[in-house]
Image (cartoon, rainbow, N blue to C red):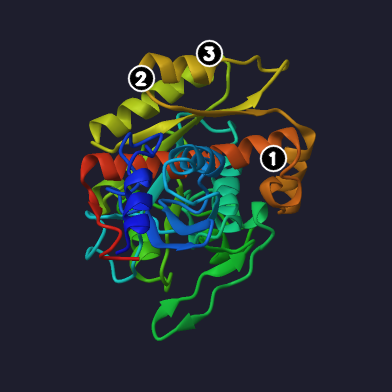
Amino acid sequence: MSNRLEDLRQALATVIEPELNRDIVSLDMVRDLEINGPVARFTIVLTTPACPLKDVFVERCNAAVLGAVPGVERLDIRWDAQVPTDRRIHGRLDVPMHSIIAVASGKGGVGKTTVATNIAAALAEAGAEVGLMDADILNPNVPVMTGLGYGRPKVVDGKMQPLEAWGVKIISTGFLTPPDKPMIMRGPMLHSAIRQFFTDVNWGRLDYMIVDLPPGTGDAPLSLAQSFPLTGAVVVTQPQDVAVADALRCAAMFETLEVPLLGVVENMSGDFFGSGGGEQLAGQLDLTFLGRVPLAAELRESGDYGRPLVITAAESAAGGALVSVAQAVAARASVMMLQGNDVIPLDVIG
């Protein structure tokens, strides 16, 4: 390696990744170094395609390199992403899933499925391979919120093929039963259904499996946590006290099940329901506050019409908030795995 390339590498080794608090060279985030005349080119491999920190990396790399590496006057930074693979998931499933993220709430009606659907769609829009599992077996809402209605998945070689919408692979009991027929199941049947959604569906390679859990602390989250290693859980609440109290119980359930908590989302925030309850809960539990989503008519309409707001109106207040939530969830999942050593190195599995 030429002296200038080594100087470039050493300069970049002073750039600290903001969330992991380690330099980007030791994290193996810097690839393909080259210098052509006054231009230094390299690739930064992010831990999620939904990373919100690109501008921070650009600023820090420019500050570290320009003036420190002789003759370099400009940086040409290319971007790539490799989502860390949760070591506990690797080898446990027939399909390569990098991470499994549950979205939960203590009570119904707080917009949990809206949040889960928009997280999945936003991550897919950013370039990730995403699955969305509707684990609310008895009251599935994902088919409506993704615009898929009640189509039936095909079966190929003994496995169901997930339906697709907005770049997301989706499975739900809503695809398997008529909309006017109730799903009546006891606990063991719920457990079996959730397991089958993992093992009997041809998901293909996934960076993120987003699991939309039913509200409460019943059989579904217990079955999920006992059957598959969860990278983390997101707790959704409304701002008012009664919703926050139930969200507290939901968070306590995951702590009991030893599932890491990625953070809290405050949905339907604004004058009608107030604001601040979700952020206060995150502070009380020493969790990350993932974001506040305002109460907005267009968000309700997007769910009714099956068009995720992060795709159709990402520039709106609610759409932008949900994009930020998705970015924060992905970032927290990567940080949690990398800090906890529950990850297969990026150079082992892409």
Residues at badges 3 and 1 in contact (C-beta under 8 Å)? no
Residue 237 % position (x, y): 52, 27
Q: Residue at x 24, y 31 (%)?
A: 256
Mark 1 Cα-neighbour bin, 10 Å: few <14, some 14–19, many ≥20: many
List the single residue furthest toward the bottom.
157
Residue at numbered disc 3 = 241
- Reply above or below: 350 against 88: below
Q: Residue at x 42, y 41 (%)?
A: 68
Q: Residue at x 32, y 62 (%)?
A: 2
Q: Residue at x 45, y 59 (%)?
A: 43
- Reply above or below: 318 against 249: below
Find the distance from the CA under tag 3 to the CA under tag 2: 18 Å
Residue 335 % position (x, y): 34, 40
Residue at numbered disc 2 = 286
Instruction: Name the mark on residue 319.
Output: 1
For marks 3 and 1, the one nearer the N-term is 3
